Image (spheres, rainbow, N blue to C red):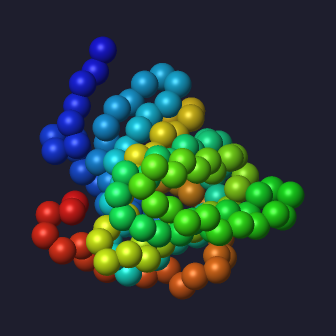
Amino acid sequence: MKTTTVETAERGRSPLGAYIRFLVDGPHGNMIHSTVPPGMVGRACRFRTIDEYWFVLSGGGEIWRRAADGRESITRLIPGVCVDVPLGTAFQYRCTGDGPLVFTCTAMPPWPGDDEALLVDGPWTPSVDVEPPGSLT
C-alpha cells in the first residue's frame, strides 16, 4: 500500500513540457499531477503503448486530439472535466487561462519512459520553455 501527497511527491518534467509530480506507481498503471503554466503550449505527440486518463483540477485550457481513424476534436479543459487519450491518438494541450492548468493523469499500463512519446505535428506552436511563477514545479 502506498500513500503520498502532492507536496511531497517527486518532481519532474514531462517530455511534452508540463511540470509533473509522481503520485503513485503500480503494476497496472501510475498517476501524476501535471501543471501547465499560463501561456504554455505542450509538444504534440502520440504514445507507443499506453492510454491516458485526465481529470482537470483547476485552471483552464484546451486539448486537441486526433484519433487513429482521423477524427479530430478540441476539448475545453476546465475543473471537473475528464478526457481520455486512447492508444494511437495524437494530442496536444495548452493553458489558456490566467492561472496554471492543473490535472491528474493516469497511465495504463504504467508509463515506460520518455521515449513513449512520439512527437507529431499539432495545431499549435509549442512553447514549453515558459517558466511558471512561484513554486508550481
Image point (50%, 31%), residue name = 29
Q: Residue furthest right?
A: 69
Instruction: Count the numbered circles shown.
Output: 0
Q: Position of residue 18 (x, y in %)?
A: 38, 63
Q: Position of residue 115 (x, y in %)?
A: 53, 54
| Nearest the eye: 74 or 70 | 74
Q: Position of residue 62 (x, y in %)?
A: 53, 69
Image point (66%, 76%), residue name = 121
The reply to whether residue 27 is visible in this rendering is yes
The reply to whether residue 42 is visible in this rendering is no
Q: Is residue 71 left or right of residue 82?
A: right
Q: Residue furthest top?
A: 1
Image point (43%, 25%), residue name = 26
Image point (46%, 60%), residue name = 78
Q: Is residue 66 above or below residue 8?
A: below
Q: Is residue 48 left or right of residue 2?
A: right
Q: Is residue 32 left or right of residue 93?
A: left
Q: Is residue 40 above or below residue 76?
A: below
Q: Is residue 103 above or below residue 31?
A: below
Q: Position of residue 137 (x, y in %)?
A: 22, 60
Q: Quadrant of the N terminus?
A: top left
